[in-house]
Image (cartoon, helix red, strand yellow):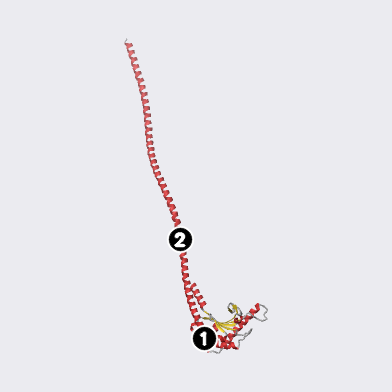
Amino acid sequence: MEDEDSNTALNISDLMASLMLFFLFISVAFMLEIQKENDSIKSIIAVYQNSQKELNTLIKNNIKIQKENDSLKKIILVYKKSKKELNKLVENNLKIQKENNSLKNIILIYQNSKKELTKLVESNIKIQKVNQATKNIITIYQNSKKELNKMLHNEFDKDLKQWNAEITQENTIRFFIPFESASNEVPNVFKKILTNFFPRYINILIDNKIKDEIKEIRVEGHTSNVWNNAKNKEQIYLNNLNLSQERAKNVLIYLYDIDNSILSKNESWLEKKFRVNGMAFAKPIKINNKINWDKSRRVEFSIETKTEEKIQQIINQMKK
């Protein structure tokens, strides 16, 4: 009995040991399972924590990006505004540039115009001076001309009819028909006239008011347009040209032979002033607009003054 009891107790003890071992295995398995779960939870927590960090980083980055985007938007907005302002500035600058170019052109035109105006003013002043000087010379010339005309008339009026002569407004003294037809020999009658006339004429010209203004004393021969037995018009002209020249020259030769103290004293001056010209029938005399060929046959005494020479000198001085 005792053996049976001991066996029974052993079996119960083994059973209990087995159960305990079984429960131990279960506990270990459960613990292992819990450990796995804990590891999984830890992994999940680690992943969560990492994810949270990544998320926070992403959130921070997103916030940063958002801020950057906002800044960028502001920058873009400012850029757009600045671009508009810049465009306005560029347009204004172009406008100002055009205005400056226009202004430069205006200034250049003004400067050129000013130079031209200055030249014109200077030229006008010179012209005015020339005109004034010319007027003064012409006034002196006209006064001298009137004075000379008066002196000639006072001296010769009483003789003109007898001499068949006249004094023109230009102070030319004309002796009509003094030569025989086709002859160049000075007739005795005309020699007497010249002997009487010429010293008195020179005595007037050497007056201090007149002498220095005389450039030339001219003796001119003039003929008609006729020449007997001439073959053509050319021969008529050339023959009369030669005849008029010879007549003027012969008059001058006779004037040199006149014995007179006035002429002797002024011989050198006369030689510088005397000019002899043969005019043929180039300057015929007209009466009532009709040529009078008898009157055209003549010898003329005239003077040329220095008026034109003085005017030209003034113009040349103004050009310098």
Classify mark 2: helix, strand or loop: helix
Residue 218 lies in what quarter of the image? Answer: bottom right
Q: Which residue is mark 1?
A: 155
Closer-to-camera residue (30/21): 30
Q: Which residue is mark 2?
A: 106
Residue at the image point whose x is 65% and y is 79% from the top:
236
Q: Position of residue 60 (x, y in %)?
A: 37, 39
At label 2, which amino acid type do we have?
Answer: Ile
Residue at far front of view: 288
Classify mark 1: helix, strand or loop: helix
User: Alpha-carbon neighbours of circle 1 within 10 Å: few (<14), some, or many (≥20)?
Assistant: some
Residue at far left of view: 2
Q: Position of residue 214 (x, y in %)?
A: 52, 81
Give the Cα separation between the discs numbered 2 and 1. 70 Å
Closer-to-camera residue (71/250): 250
- The quadrant in which the N terminus is found is top left
